[in-house]
Image: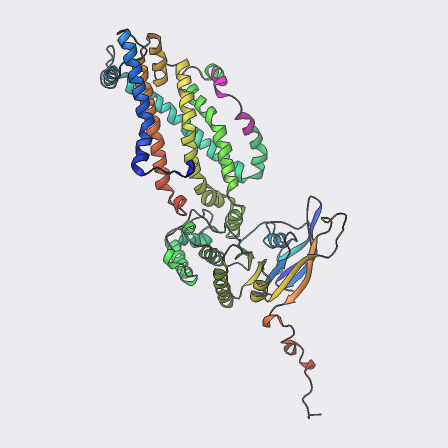
Amino acid sequence: MSFVSVRDVWQAYDGRSILERVNVEVEEGEFISIVGASGCGKSTFLRMLLAEEVPVRGAISIDGGAPAVEPGRERGVVFQRYSVFPHMTVRENIIAAEGFAKPSGWLFGSARKAARNRADAMLVRIGLNHVADQYPASLSGGMQQRLAIGQALTAKPRVLLLDEPFGALDPGTRLQMHDFLTELRAETGMTVFMVTHDLAEGFKLGDRVLVFDKVRWDPMDPGLHGATITYDFDARDGGVPFQHILDRYPSLAPEPVGKA
Amino acid sequence: MRIINHIPTRPTAVLLAALPFVAVLVAYAIGSEIRLAENPADKLLPAPAQIGATALRLFTEGDRRTGEILLWKDTWASLMRLLFGVGIAATVSLVLGMAIGLVPYVRRLMSGFVAVVSMVPPLALLPILFIVFGLGEVSKVVLIVIGITPIMTRDLAQRVLDIPKEQIVKAQTLGASSWVIVARVALPQVLPRLIANIRLSLGSAWLFLIAAEAVASDVGLGYRIFLVRRYLAMDVILTYVLWITALAFVIDWALKTISRRAFPWLEAGL
């Protein structure tokens, strides 16, 4: 059984279908980019992965567990905006990722000291140690998103969900964030789902690119049918498929010349 | 250049700010002068010097019978009523507002009710309060509470609803329980709004306080103003009005300062 398993998922609001018959299996450590036109259900799909919404039919499970009914610690998330807490300093935001799980919401004594040290290490890792005592509002957009990613990773989620995380950034910062995310992924081997509008970004970062679109279209009632996954591209090796097919099927290799 | 683009320099700005105050004082002095020239016994517009003398007397000299300085006694009584009224209203509206903003069941249960209750004119309830709670302190405090709580509640609930959904979801992905979301995400962000709310509601609170004191009381700033009205003692009334204004201004300034000191993150983006 695969790590993240999406089985026959449907979603509808007020009887209007948004997503239909979505099936996808994802292995642990894969980076999945999700692209598609506006309003075709990409974000709905992400919200269902997050368990912020429950599908009307079908189920999504992580590592064979029961389908979740509300967001929890196994799914981390970074939104385009508002992903950090404006009333906490940068360091507090990271510590909160550990403290929030406690019954009181706070860490005390040695636990707090240890969390603070880990938070400082994380801040060094995401390059924000020089602004540890500032509030998020005084940071640039790219720094805020780095903080949001660092915060999400501190909670050690099984799956990281990114909803257009770089959509509000300028192109230069966006490229820096790509490098940052690639490095982080190489270190943590995390399973990532990323919704993006930017096809190039999707192919650059993703191992697979899922395209959402409507396969059925009623001209009299365009909202009748929902979207589904229409393409599932292999985006590794620069998007050129079947580069490693011989590893999986050695028998396909051409016979060496002269041996027969 | 357009008038909206003319920006006064610093000295001009200070001068402009002072101008209305000076204008009112001058207008009063002239009016008082004219009336007193015609009739030295006129009581409607006492001379500024006379108001000063009266104020000094009111602030320092005790009552002939009891020896107590009535102005301080009135001030103490009124401020206590105001403190209890606003304190209770703030506590109730904070709890209710947070619950309405965060818990869908409570929102369905209470938001319509609060919206309707906030439309009841509080002063129309004053007779009922006097009948139910008697003429003592309770009815005055309750009038303030009833007068400002519904509106504060609505505003705070809206403020909680305005917290981006993303933050609430993010807190959940970090493992926060409902209680932790209340204590560590919603409450810290709503507290500045609570203080702003108290500042806005203080005007209404003073109104309800003085109205209640005017109708039935034996001590208090509003009571004293309405008592001396019978003797046309304008100098006393004006002293009390200026004193109430000064108190209201100091309270407002104190709350503003507290808000700025306590919530540095509010100004971080500026």
Q: Is residue B218 visible?
A: no
Residue situated in front as seen by the camera: A118 or A81: A81
Q: How is the image coloured?
A: rainbow
Please give left or right for residue A24 compared with residue A89 in the image.
right
Magenta range: B114-126
Where B263 falls versus A77 (above or below)?
Answer: above
Whether B117 is among the magenta residues is yes
| Quadrant of the snapshot with the C terminus of chain A | bottom right
The dominant secondary structure in magenta is: helix
Where A193 falls versus B243 (above or below)?
Answer: below
* Residue A227 quadrant: bottom right
* Residue B266 quadrant: top left
Whether B70 is among the magenta residues is no
Residue situated in front as seen by the camera: B64 or B254: B254
Q: Give me the residue at 66% from left, 61% from top.
A: A24
Residue situated in front as seen by the camera: A206 or A7: A206
Count the numbered circles shown.
0
Q: In x, y percent, where is residue B251?
A: 34, 30
Q: In x, y percent, where is residue A194?
A: 57, 59
Q: In x, y percent, where is residue B113?
A: 56, 28
Q: Is residue A93 visible?
A: yes
Please give left or right for residue B233 compared with residue A249 in the image.
left
Q: Residue furthest front?
A: B1
Q: Give me the residue at 44% from left, 23% from top.
A: B144
| Quadrant of the snapshot with the N terminus of chain A | bottom right
Q: In x, y percent, where is residue A105?
A: 45, 48
Where B167 falls versus B96 (above or below)?
Answer: below
